[in-house]
Image (cartoon, helix red, strand yellow):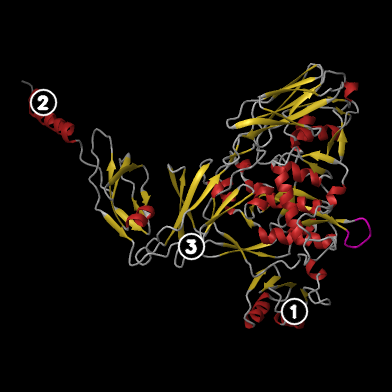
Amino acid sequence: MTATNKILKILLPLIILVFSSLIFTGCGSIATPILTLNGYTVSWGVVDGAEGYEVNLNNRVFQTNDTSINIIQDLQQEGIVVVSVRALTNSFFSSSSNYSTPITASVGSSRLNAPQNLSIDISNNIYTLSWDSVANAEMYCVKLVRDNTETTYHYASTTTLNLNSVLSGGGEYTASVFAYSRDLNNYGPSLYSNLVEFAYSTLLETPQNTEASISGNTVHYSWDAVEGARGYNVSILNGETSFTTATSISLDLNLSAGETAFLSVQAVSNDLTYRQNSAFSDMSAVYTTASKSSYVGKMYNLGTTQFDLVADSYAELEAIVHFGLYYRINNICFFDNYSTYSDRDPINALGSYVEIKYVTYNQYISRNSMGMRELTIADYQHTNHPTKVAAGDTEVRQNTAVTPTSYTDTPRASDFDDFKINDRTTTMMVYNSDQLYYAVQNGARPTFPNTTAPAYTAYNAAKDVLREIVDDSMTDYEKTLAIFDWLCYTVKYDYNLVDLTSTNNATIYDYRGFYIEGVLFDNGQAVCDGIAKTFALMCNIEGIDCYKVTGMASGGGHAWDKVRLDLDNDGTGEWYAVDPTWNDHTQIYPNGTYEETLSHNYFLSTDDYLESNDHTETSPLTDVANTSFDYYRYTLYDGTHSLYVANMPELESILLYFENNADLSHIEFKTYLPSSIVINYIDSLNYECVYLDNIYIVY
């Protein structure tokens, strides 16, 4: 026997023994989790080799891939919670761990008081749950039960919760809420509040896959069926609307050669308790078979711009393309009729349309059988009715000590409708809120296919605000100031939506904060785009020329406005820049709460002033705002002296005036005196003060 064989004879039994041990016992158990309790969260570190964790909570066993669990609901219901966790593995060479040492949490010495006065407000299809605050509570847990079968829990750091972002679908709901604190040793979670019951109504799906064709004088229009619809409203751009219970319709429109039919469809609900009528679909176009000459003179409107579908210049081509984008027409056709035409022209026109924002699209240029250029917009992601509300933990509140002083003392009647916009002779059909503000800022009076179009609701909500804050005795300047103040005071900047955009741009166009809806219907929760659109809408309803500007500020996209006012009474009117978003001065408190305070630093500014404050205009609307105006020098606080303070005697005078006028909630002024001197003087009078860039707001 060789030496090698002798060694193998000795080692082989040992190898077999070790291998057998591995088969029957593996390499041992993976590590046991070590639990910690922080407030209402039980957590543990990641265990090497673990493929999940098994939790035993009050003898209820479940699995999770997370390394923490929230126990507040169980603690609230049962008063005491005992938790242990083991790490799981399916590895051949190791086994799952033992259960950890249990960790126990209890409600402590006493429970918090249960929230009182739970109620729900339903306005313009926005559902807001609210309740009274509870002393020593830091958080609230809302329990929603749908149709007595589906239960979900949602958390809030404030005493309101917008339900549109959390409700799972139409149905009958009950809601209740309890309060809790992170200091569980002294403040146990409260009992539940009273129950509220409500029916939640969602929108029907918008009809898809619309197709239109023409045969003789008859236009055929079809679409996919929508679940829950009892029928469909078909709207034609000429203002006619037809109802059908089928998923197609044939219309004798008697189109002459060169005329085009534009159609849109809305699903009509069979049960308005749980489902509302849908938004109108994108528009389909039907072109009559005719020569170029037949299309000449068949005019359409985009605001006050008139055009036909024979582009005699790039400017007319741009109007045609913008018209197609405005109405979401995915196949806008036209004849080119100028010698310098390039296939890049329609693409350039697409890029110049300032409302292509938060959407993606592809474009193709081809010719149809009549020789018309056909611009096809594919993968055009957008919404005709935004429904989503951003949820998050960021709390934004308004400094209610600083209130608008610009509103009328004599509000208009609730049925007042003699608005200046009614004097406009050019009209445009409007289906959604983006079309609404775009139409009015471009000189048109909006018309609507019916009163269930989302834009109709937004238009009347804006009028309701104007009935309250302005009257016809006010000058255009006073009306503009009142609208500006209302927006700054009412709207809270939607930081939760900003956080969402930084991580998810796929469906960002569906969030209401980018639209008028966020301002008017979501308790004033919007970002700059929604705010600027609403300012343009409200000014134009009052007959004040105003439009939204797009650009950059602080390294990101931004929107503000330009408004035309005749402050020097020369009969012409000058353009001024207005930024109602930046005019809400924001302070951030240590607990992460944002507080906004109304100011006027960006009211009727010049382009140069905004540019010096990090604004870069990129939109092609190039009216120059270069007329000097200073709100603080223009505004007199006592009929004689302005809000611009030049020296210490003037500082003493303005603060003495404030002290002697109990009806004033605050006073705002500008001064270039050293800030330390001004603030020390204000402190000596025991007033609160907000300070920003030589602007002082004392209250």
Q: Is residue 322 above or below residue 619?
A: above
Give residue 79's position: percent from left, percent from top: 32, 58
297 vs 581, nearest the viewer: 297
Q: Which residues are magenta?
A: 566-572
Q: Is residue 623 visible?
A: no
Q: Is residue 398 above or below residue 549?
A: below
- Single out the residue that lies furthest toward the left: 1
258 vs 448, nearest the viewer: 448
Front disc: 3 or 2: 3
C-alpha span from label 2 to label 1? 103 Å
Q: Secondary structure at mark 2?
A: helix
Which residue was labeled with disc 2? 8
Which residue was labeled with disc 3? 116
Q: Secondary structure at mark 1?
A: helix
| The C terminus, quarter of image | bottom right
- The residue type indicated by label 2 comes to Leu
| The N terminus, quarter of image | top left
Which residue was labeled with disc 1? 654
Q: Find out whether residue 53 is within the magenta segment.
A: no
Give residue 136's position: percent from left, percent from top: 44, 67
